[in-house]
Image (cartoon, grey):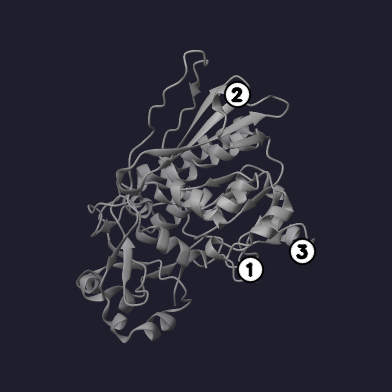
Amino acid sequence: MFRFLFILVLLFPAGCRQPSTAKPADRPVGVVDTIHYAHGFFIVRYPGYRDVGIIDRRAGRADTLHFLLVEQGVAPPADRSGLPVIVTPVKSMVVLSSMHVAMAEFAGVADRITGLGSIQYVYSPIVRAGIRAGKVKQVGIDAGINNEAVISLHPDLVLTMSNPQAGAGAYKTLADAGIPVIPDADWLETSPLGRAEWVRLWGALVDKDAMVNKKFDSLVQSYQRLAAIGSQASPKPTVITDMPFKGTWYVPAGESFMAQFLRDAGADYHWSDTKGTGSLPLSFEAVAPIALKADFWLNQGLVDSRADVGAKDSRFASFKSFQTGNLYNYNRRINDLGSNDYWESGSMHPDLILADLIRILHPGLLPQDSLYYYKQLK
């Protein structure tokens, strides 16, 4: 399910970074948190509270949705009336994406999740234990969200996967009930580290900034060390990704975080120079000339063997990668519920994904060749 959501949301373009906001003369000067890789949010610290801005990046817009994170026991600032207030640390939350589960795990607060969009596809042992104990309820997603179920949980906030303006309209009922709804637009980021850096927002929400920042900095070092190895590797094998879906072949646009993964792994990717942070919707005929000669084929989706791939379309048998067996999919870690951990913990461990890609494309370049999220389709 999250795979299809991922395909759909990748179709939006990127926009501008942090806008300037005028401040009344009597408001203290805020301290802006340093965000190194993400472009879709910012945090400004004031005495007793923080201003979180989620930037609407559709079609080049730079509108910002603001939330005030107010420390428990501190009165909200009088000159910011009308903005949603979230009392920190957040003790309970409803999350609608597997990415949010991964971020909660990373921040050490997965046990604070009380509601999920769907309980069918969950990998986190902590959240699954909460589901079994009846502490985590299913609330639905998008048009299917059960507002009454969410309100009955009395969460401190709801995290969605949407643009700011889309989130503001779709979840008006919850906002009117006094439940802040934060739209998480990490999927619009242009790099794997930018996407993962949204976890700094979680650090602010649960007052675990120091721990989260330390873990994230360690992740950055690991990723950059691997990228220095992979990006310099030679020769660079040609690569195609994904598989046609309802007649359209969605491939990563050149400014997407998946395209950055491929560059950092030392791949020769045909659409690397295209514009856009999402996917390029192409026809089979547009992709086929590249696919026929590509050395590797990655990320085929809901298939588990070479035979499964061939059964999807007889034309795939003509691809070089199909004939040589260089088919690799991200489905090594699937639990008994059918949940794929690539879409959950993988979002917060891009270094492990990058290591897999380097091992696939450049065998022997890293100390050992065992894969974590990927497996060869045989």
Badge nearest the viewer, 1 or 2:
2
Q: Secondary structure at mark 3?
A: helix
Q: Which residue is mark 1?
A: 120
Q: Amino acid at mark 2?
A: Pro
Q: Which residue is mark 3?
A: 132
304 and 66: which one is in front? 66
Determine if residue 43 is in view.
yes
Disc 2: CA contacts within 10 A as few (<14), some (14-19) or many (>=20)? some
202 and 170: which one is in front? 170
CB of mark 1 within 8 Å of CB of mark 3?
no
Distance from Cα at disc 1 to Cα at disc 3: 12 Å
Q: Position of residue 98 (x, y in %)?
A: 56, 57
Q: Is residue 177 above or below residue 37?
A: below
The extreme top residue here reads 26
The mark that comes first in sequence, 1 or 2, is 2
Q: Position of residue 22 (x, y in %)?
A: 41, 23
Q: Amino acid at mark 1?
A: Gln
In the picture, the disc for residue 77 is 2
Distance from Cα at disc 2 to Cα at disc 3: 41 Å
